[in-house]
Image (cartoon, rainbow, N blue to C red):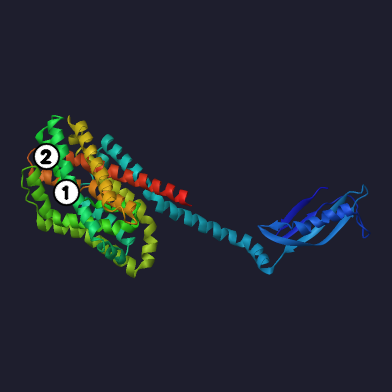
Amino acid sequence: MNLSSSILGKNLQIHRFHRPQLEFSTNISSRNQSILGLFDRFPPQINGVSVRCSNIWLSADWSSKFSISTRCVPNSSSESLRLDCDSSSSSPEILNQKKASFVEILKQSNSLLPHVVLASTLIALIFPPSFAWFTSRYYAPALGFLMFAVGVNSSEKDFLEAFKQPTAIFAGYVGQFFVKPLLGYLFGTIAVTFFGLPTAIGAGIMLVSCVSGAQLSSYATFLTDPSLAPLSVVMTSLSTATAVFVTPFLSLLLIGKRLPVDVKGMISSITQIVVAPIAAGLLLNRFFPKICEAIRPFLPPLSVLVTACCVGAPLAININAVISPFGFSILLLIVAFHLSAFIAGYALTGFAFHRAPDVKALQRTLSYETGMQSSLLALALANRFFQDPLVGVPPAISTVMMSLMGFSLVMIWNKSKEKNMIKQS
């Protein structure tokens, strides 16, 4: 028996045409009755909708070959409506799917950040003019934009919850101004004693360890654990606000040089880079949610571009210092310093907060806070208050390596979280 089907709208015709046919209204053999019974036991489907078949008859040609002709309709009126609407609604659905996929692509731009940071580093090394135009006057607006992105994706309740964790805030502060300076003093001493580098290089490494946390640490936390981004912002803001007193004291203690830091200038910088952008994002999210929904998908790719400029520019501007005869040795020491700080922040947090329900997320957050410093501030202090230009070499290299290592951890930890979620599901 040879069956063929053609679907038009909601009707299904199963038929076979032969030469002049003779219809039988007489008895049908049991074999052919079983064939007809297949439609009762296994009803056909159209687009996943079961249909029933009526007006079934057998016909035979002169060679006694039988064919089946049937008319199939949906089992219910709602299914009939669904079938009718399939073809008419396909175009809007396709458009919506394309729009959704485009938005998802924009939102997933953050996953490319480590690769973009690495690419910007290589481009700055190969062709410095590509980033040399991004001078220090653009740093504050760029970092402010990243903080604005954090504010748009947060709420005031998140920051109120952050202040309810004073122990975690204190732990982050200890990591910034106790653990990190100890590591800075250790690697600064190693640079002079074991590597035989000039004293100015050791002073530059120690200077990096004396400054406050980097605003990029808050953005890294936002990419890995968005719920803890407000906590990271509070930690970074506190360390930056108190750095006007702590950084000069630590520099005097470790380096033996008192740095006259501009208190008013640092407070103004905190307001412009952290407080005002985050407040603007929170207010926009609170009173104009539709605007936030419209701009939110475009923030990730723009943030990636801004971060790439913040990483590539210091390297391009200080390329002569980076490729100096001491460049490779300083690079190894800076990498070891930041790696030790990341590990110390992660391990000490796990030890101190091992009973916390979100201990892993807290470990990642404090690891960023301890491992990522405001190396741009250290570079500015080195250029302004130290006569030897070699003091500025470690901060210049630190700016690049700190960002590259921090956002590499973002990629590693996000992949680890995805694997854990797959295992649990």
Counting every numbered tag in the picture gives: 2
Image point 36% across, 47% down: which residue?
Answer: 413
**Is residue 407 visible from the viewing direction of this image?**
yes
The residue sitting at 37% across, 60% down in the picture is 295
Residue 250 x %, y %: 10, 48
Is label 2 or label 1 in front? Answer: 1
Element under disc 1: helix
Q: Nearer the viewer, residue 86 or 354?
A: 354
257 or 175: nearer the eye? 175
Q: Residues within 10 Å of mark 1 (few under 14, many from 20)?
A: some
Residue 7: quadrant of the picture? bottom right
Q: Position of residue 11 (x, y in %)?
A: 73, 60
Q: Is residue 270 above or below residue 135?
A: below
Q: Which residue is mark 1?
A: 178
Looking at the image, the residue that sits furthest to the bottom is 287
Residue 108 located left or right of residue 59: left
Q: Which residue type carries mark 1?
A: Phe
Label 2 CA crowd tier, 10 Å (few <14, some 14–19, many 20+): many
Residue at 14 percent across and 53 percent down: it is: 243
What is the three-letter code of the residue carrying label 2? Ala
Q: Which residue is disc 2 drawn over?
A: 203
